[in-house]
Image (cartoon, grey):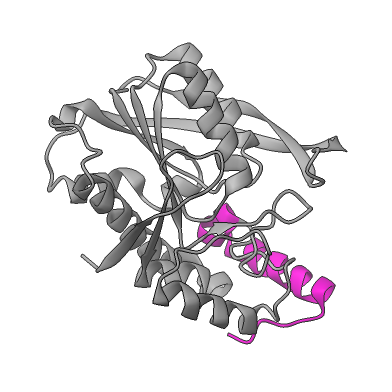
């Protein structure tokens, strides 16, 4: 298991946000970053997820009984991170409540959000919530928050609500995370969000999560300082370059991920040097 650093940060609208830093997260978001694809990305993602869940356990957010824990895998990025396998690893094969699955697809709306970015909504396409527990472990990229807001709304209507949600995001914006916390607050659910690497600013397209965005929030550690310096070089200090790109394609459709990056490089007139 790798070394990691968990930092509690101050982000408006979030009660207890954390930023997690580790070498595996650097691989996902900096070097090789966008060019880490397929099974190699899965291995780094699994290590990062183990570090996150280990940190949550060390901070006392796990219940005393493992059977009070479950995973909710939002397809397909959490599958790429092997969320359920990471939880089993952290629990040292102790038996937790079970695994649950949800498919949610987002779509762009014609009207922009008041903040000026492209707004999205989402529809739930698949749900299996047969093994829920009082504490849910979720992992997904968070941009506008539309995907998980719709997913959680449907989940709360079709299964017993948890008392706590541990939310890890491999790349997440505070904009969307606030919407998730607002929903959980209304439902009386304790919400613990952890951003991997940084809490990213949200680009105007409603999807891009750039290191070089002025709204990106860092942990304030030496690693975060070095990461930002490296990111500015890699992404040409351009606040339109997304740190992750097409998240699911990075794992499961490498050709699409490569084409997505190529299109982005051509549009921004900068080829990633790594």
Residue 255: quadrant of the picture = bottom right
Q: In the rendering, at what x and y percent does residue 46 appear?
A: 34, 58
Residue depicted at 49% across the width and 45% down the height:
140
Left or right, 199 with reference to 87: right
Answer whether residue 261 is magenta in the image: yes
Residue depicted at 76% across the width and 69% down the height:
264
Mark yes or no: residue 31 visible: no
Q: In the rendering, at what x and y percent does residue 256 appear?
A: 66, 61
Left or right, 182 with reference to 264: left
- Between 139 and 198, the residue placed more toward the observer is 198
Judge whether 23 appears above or below 218 on screen: below
Judge whether 219 appears above or below 172 on screen: below
Residue depicted at 40% across the width and 23% down the height:
189
> Magenta segment, which residues?
247-274
User: What kind of secondary structure does the magenta stretch mostly adopt?
Assistant: helix
- Count of residue discs: 0
């Amino acid at each position: 298991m790798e070394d990691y650093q968990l930092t509690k940060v101050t982000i408006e609208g979030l009660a207890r946000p954390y930023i997690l830093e580790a070498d595996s997260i650097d691989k996902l978001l900096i070097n090789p970053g966008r060019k880490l694809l397929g099974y190699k990305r899965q291995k780094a993602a699994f290590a990062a997820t183990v570090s996150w869940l280990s940190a949550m356990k060390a901070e006392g957010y796990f219940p005393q009984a493992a059977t009070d824990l479950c995973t909710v895998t939002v397809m397909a990025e959490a599958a790429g991170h092997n969320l359920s396998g990471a939880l089993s690893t952290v629990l040292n094969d102790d038996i937790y409540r079970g695994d649950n699955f949800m498919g949610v697809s987002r779509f762009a709306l014609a009207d922009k959000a008041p903040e000026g970015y492209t707004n999205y909504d989402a529809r739930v396409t698949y749900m299996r919530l047969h093994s829920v527990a009082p504490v849910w472990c979720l992992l997904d990229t968070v941009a506008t928050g539309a995907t998980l807001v719709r997913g959680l709304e449907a989940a709360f209507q079709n299964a017993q609500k948890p008392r706590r949600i541990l939310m890890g995001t491999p790349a997440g914006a505070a904009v969307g995370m606030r919407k998730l916390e607002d929903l959980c607050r209304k439902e009386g659910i304790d919400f613990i969000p952890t951003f991997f690497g940084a809490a990213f600013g949200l680009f105007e397209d409603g999807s891009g999560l750039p290191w070089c965005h002025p709204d990106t929030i860092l942990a304030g550690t030496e690693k975060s300082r070095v990461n930002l310096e490296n990111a500015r070089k890699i992404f040409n200090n351009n606040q339109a370059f997304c740190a992750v790109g097409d998240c699911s394609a990075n794992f499961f459709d490498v050709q699409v991920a490569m084409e997505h990056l190529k299109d982005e490089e051509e549009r921004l007139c900068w080829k990633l040097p790594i």
